[in-house]
């Protein structure tokens, strides 16, 4: 028994950094994430991640003037406006996705953009994936809530400054998409 104690103590010392890393993540977890997907045309595609401390990252993916990640800081008023929009949208009451006929999309149009909004808070995680080609009664009920929430996120974080109006590929000063 006497020989086991030093071995146990050594094991605890070696595992302590791993346990501490698992208990304390690297910075605040994202409170909200929004991904706008591209379409057949020139629809902008980007992701925004907002942490509870107001730090956010805009990541331009396609058809935007700013490609790649850019960091920003939301004010308490901006965070409050986004939180109010989240409560109003009542994201947790929605289905996880509106992307196929099985989700109530009838008819289903092709080559449209979409938006995926995720929240992570004290109540847990929730993601809603809405495809703008989803039509029908169910989509008509959900779309205004999703649109308003996505618009508030864009407005409060001023994503327009990075989305811009990209030129057509090959045009003078244009970007390749």
Image (cartoon, grey):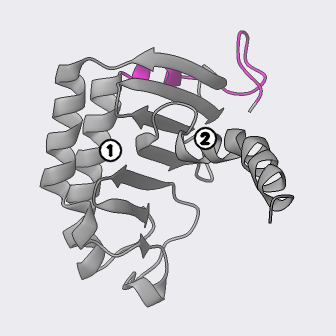
- Residue identified by numbered label 1: 150
The image quarter containing residue 50 is top left
> Would you say the magenta stretch is mainly helix, strand or loop?
loop
Q: What is the C-alpha distance between the residues marked 1 and 2?
A: 36 Å
Q: Earlier in the sequence, mark 1 or mark 2?
A: 2
What residue is shown at x 17% (from left), y 31% (from top)?
80
Which residue carries the number 2 mark?
A: 20
Q: Report whether 176 appears left or right of 51.
A: right
Task: Report x, y in % for residue 142.
Answer: 25, 67
Q: Is residue 167 visible?
A: no
Instruction: Point out residue 160 in the picture as x, y percentages from the top left corner.
Output: 41, 22
Q: Residue furthest top?
A: 173
- Are there few (<14), some (14-19), or many (20+) residues within 10 Å of tag 2? few
**Quadrant of the rendered structure where residue 32 is?**
top left
- Tell me where residue 112 appears, x and y as whole percent: 52, 59
**Can see residue 124?**
yes
Q: Secondary structure at mark 2?
A: helix
Q: Which region is colored magenta?
A: 158-176
- The residue shown at (47%, 36%) is 49
Q: Regarding mark 1 in the picture, which secondary structure is present there?
A: helix
Q: Nearer the viewer, residue 31 or 170?
A: 31
Q: Farthest front residue? A: 2
Above or below for 22 versus 46: below
Quadrant containing the N terminus in the rendered view = bottom right
Q: Residue at x 81, y 49 (%)?
A: 6
* Residue 39 on the magenta span: no
Q: Nearer the viewer, residue 137 or 33?
A: 33
Queried whether the magenta region covers residue 172, the answer comes back as yes
Viewport quadrant of the C terminus: top right
């Amino acid at each position: 028994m006497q020989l086991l104690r030093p071995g146990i103590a050594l094991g605890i010392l070696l595992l302590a950094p791993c346990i501490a890393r698992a208990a304390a993540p690297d910075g605040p977890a994202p409170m909200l994430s929004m991904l706008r997907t591209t379409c057949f045309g020139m629809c902008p595609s980007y992701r925004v991640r907002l942490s509870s401390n107001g730090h956010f990252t805009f990541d331009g993916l396609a058809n935007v003037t700013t490609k790649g990640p850019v960091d920003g800081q939301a004010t308490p008023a901006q965070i409050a406006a986004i939180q109010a929009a989240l409560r109003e949208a009542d994201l947790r009451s929605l289905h996880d996705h509106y992307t196929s006929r099985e989700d109530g999309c009838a008819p289903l149009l092709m080559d449209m953009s979409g938006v995926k909004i995720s929240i992570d808070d004290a109540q847990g995680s929730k993601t809603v994936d809405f495809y703008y080609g989803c039509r029908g009664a169910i989509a008509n009920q959900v779309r205004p809530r999703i649109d308003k929430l996505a618009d508030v996120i864009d407005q409060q974080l001023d994503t327009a400054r990075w989305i811009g109006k990209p030129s057509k590929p090959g045009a003078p000063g244009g970007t390749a998409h």
